[in-house]
Amino acid sequence: KVTVPQPPQTRFIAVANQKGGVGKTTTTVNLAAAFASLGSQVLVIDMDPQGNASTALGVPHESGVPSTYDVLEGRYGIEEVKVASPGFETLEVVPSSIDLSGAELEVAELPERNHLLKNALAKFLKGSKKHYDYIFIDCPPSLGLLVLNAMCSVNEVLIPVQAEYYALEGLQQLLHTIGLVQQSYNPYLVISTMLLTMYDKRTLLSKEVFDEVREHYPEIVLNTTIPRSVKISEAPSFQQSVITYDPRGAGAISYEEAALEIASRSEQVLERITKRKQGE
Ligand code: ADP
Ligand code: MG
């Protein structure tokens, strides 16, 4: 059985892009599933009121289910709301429900409003007997309070980039926002990873986008790309990741390769984070 080398310390990764439909949730779910199937201990925090990551990981997320919403508002700790993803031994999920859409307004006046998730996560990890190798946060397609909470809770951002013509334009704005977050809220944040999604080998456009992203961000973009695949898009309707739904298909294999590549960069990424901490 193939396993992945575990990082020397927990990697906290927010999967973010203010554009909708670029593959954030698909990437969060399938990378998390890939890492878990390769032996990592993984926690996924669903920060999107749509709850699509919760769906794909097979965990209940109707309105009223204890969720990220309750964690942010302090009614429950992460320990109390996290649930195991069926079919995995080392994959847990903090589900989100539509209730989360109310949080933005409800906590708007709290002085700690941008650090609610960070504080909850710190408390949880302090009391947890388990060691997590990877903690992924699936962000909604916006740059509001929920995304800010996610970016204050992590030290890495993973940006899925859809292989299409306007990809680069949106990226500029996202990078600008991450720059503001670094200045004002979380100086230790690095953009660790970019991953090309819905890549079509047959089109020149896909290759052009990949080449351009690689030219601008050579150290960040993964060599692995995720192909456009019907199995990947079908899996959530069976409450599954593509890793369990179609384990031998191109989609599962590409996410496993992405996971291995991300793991192989652990030292390099943690070094970049340490440097930021030392103010270099
Ligand atoms: P986001 O979370 O950024 O809004 P999603 O991950 O929900 O984006 O993806 C948007 C849509 O594209 C979904 O219907 C998803 O199933 C589909 N999709 C994502 N990645 C792929 C892929 N590699 N191949 C085919 N469909 C994909
Ligand atoms: Mg999503």
Image (spheres, rainbow, N blue to C red):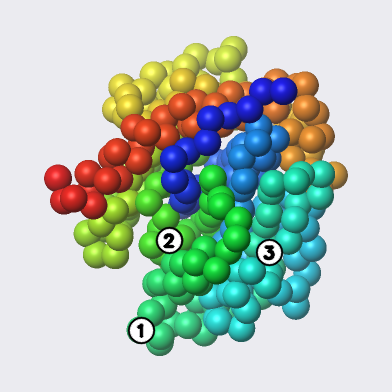
Q: Is residue 72 above or below residue 222?
A: below
Disc 1 marks which amino acid?
Pro
Q: Is residue 13 left or right of residue 99?
A: left
The residue that label 1 is drawn on is: 111
Q: Position of residue 167 (x, y in %)?
A: 44, 36
Relative image position of residue 20 (x, y in whole percent): 55, 49
- Of tags 1 and 2, which is closer to the observer? 2
Q: CA distance from mark 1 to mark 3?
A: 26 Å
Callout 1 crowding tier (Cα within 10 Å): few <14, some 14–19, many ≥20: few
**The N terminus - image quarter:** top right
Within the image, what quadrant is residue 216 found in? top left
> Label 3 neighbourhood size at 10 Å, few (<14), some (14-19), many (20+)?
some
Residue picked out by circle 2: 153
Q: Is residue 279 above or below residue 62?
A: above
The amino acid type, in three-letter code, at marker 3 is: Lys
Q: How many marks?
A: 3
Q: Residue at x 61, y 40 (%)?
A: 40
Query: What's the CA distance linking mark 1 and mark 2?
Result: 16 Å
Q: Position of residue 64 (x, y in %)?
A: 75, 78
Dot 1 or dot 2: first in sequence order is 1
Quadrant location of residue 137?
Answer: bottom right
Measure the C-alpha gap from mark 2 to mark 3: 17 Å
Task: Say which mark, if any, is on residue 82.
Answer: 3
Nearer-N-terminus badge (1/3) = 3
**Most foreground residue, 175 or 70:** 70
